[in-house]
Image (cartoon, rainbow, N blue to C red):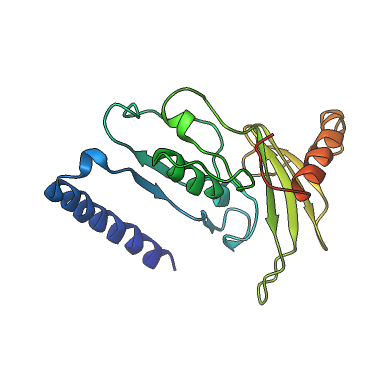
Amino acid sequence: NYRNYCESLAAFDRELVRLLDELDRLGITHNTALVLAGDNGYSWGEHMDVGKRDASEVNMRIPLIVRYPRGTVKPGRRPEGMALNIDLAPTLLDLAGAAPKKDCDGLSLKPVLENRKDKVRDSFLYEYFKDFPYNVPEQYGVRTESHIYMNYRGRRKAGIFDVNKDPGYRNNRIATPEGKRMLPEMKRLLVQYRGGADNGK
C-alpha cells in the first residue's frame, strides 16, 4: 500500500546517510562511484491501475543518480538523455577501466557523466510478457525522445503517443497524418530491436 511505499522511501534515505558516513569514515569517498537507481516506477491510479506493468511514463521514468570521484562528473548536472537499467553494468565497467563485451546489452553512460555527450541512445525497446496471475496484456513497443509506439496482444489497439505533450497517453496519434508518417519508422525500429541487442541506434 501507499503508506508502506512511503515508509520504504524514508528508510532508504536513512540508510543512504549511514552509507555515506561510512564511506567518509573509511576515507574512500573520493575513490568510490555511487549509483542510485530504481528498477521501475509505480502507478497509483494514473491509468486506472495500481502497479508497474505498462509502458506509462510514471512506470518508466525512474531516478538515476550518480556521484563519482571529484573532477570526473560535474556536480548538479541533469542530463535529459534516455538511460536504461541495462546501461548500469557497462557504465560501471567503463568507470572502473574495464571494457564491456561487444555483445553486451546496454551502453556505457560514462560519456554523458563526463559531459562529452548529451545522450547515448535515440530510442529503446519496451517489452512486457505474460505475467500470471496479473491480467495485463503482453505488450511491446519503441520509445523515442518524443514518442512511444505500443502494440498489445488482446484487448487494446496499437498506439503512438507524444510523450512530451501527452505524458498520460490520452490521445492516440496512430490514425493522424503525423502518426501515419511515423508508423513505418517505428515498425522498422521495433523489428530491429526485437532481432538483437540494444545498441542504441
Q: Is residue 81 above or below residue 38?
A: above
Asked whether residue 110 appears in the rendered view, the answer is yes
Nearest to the observer: residue 188 or residue 181: 188
- Residue depicted at x 45% and y 42%: 98
Asked whether residue 179 appears in the rendered view, the answer is no
Q: Residue furthest bottom?
A: 133
Please identify the quarter of the rendering in which residue 48 is found.
Answer: bottom right
Q: Residue furthest left?
A: 25
x, y percentage for residue 22?
Answer: 17, 53
x, y percentage for residue 1?
Answer: 44, 69
x, y percentage for residue 25?
Answer: 12, 50
- The mark total stands at 0
Which quadrant holds the C terminus?
top right
- Residue depicted at x 66% and y 77%: 133
- Residue depicted at x 39% and y 42%: 96
Q: Residue furthest top?
A: 116
Please identify the quarter of the rendering in which residue 19 is found.
Answer: bottom left
Q: Is residue 73 above or below residue 159?
A: above
Q: Is residue 14 above or below residue 142?
A: below
Q: In this image, 121 relative to 196: left or right?
A: left
Nearest to the observer: residue 182 or residue 162: 182
Q: In this image, 189 relative to 52: left or right?
A: right
x, y percentage for residue 97?
Answer: 41, 39
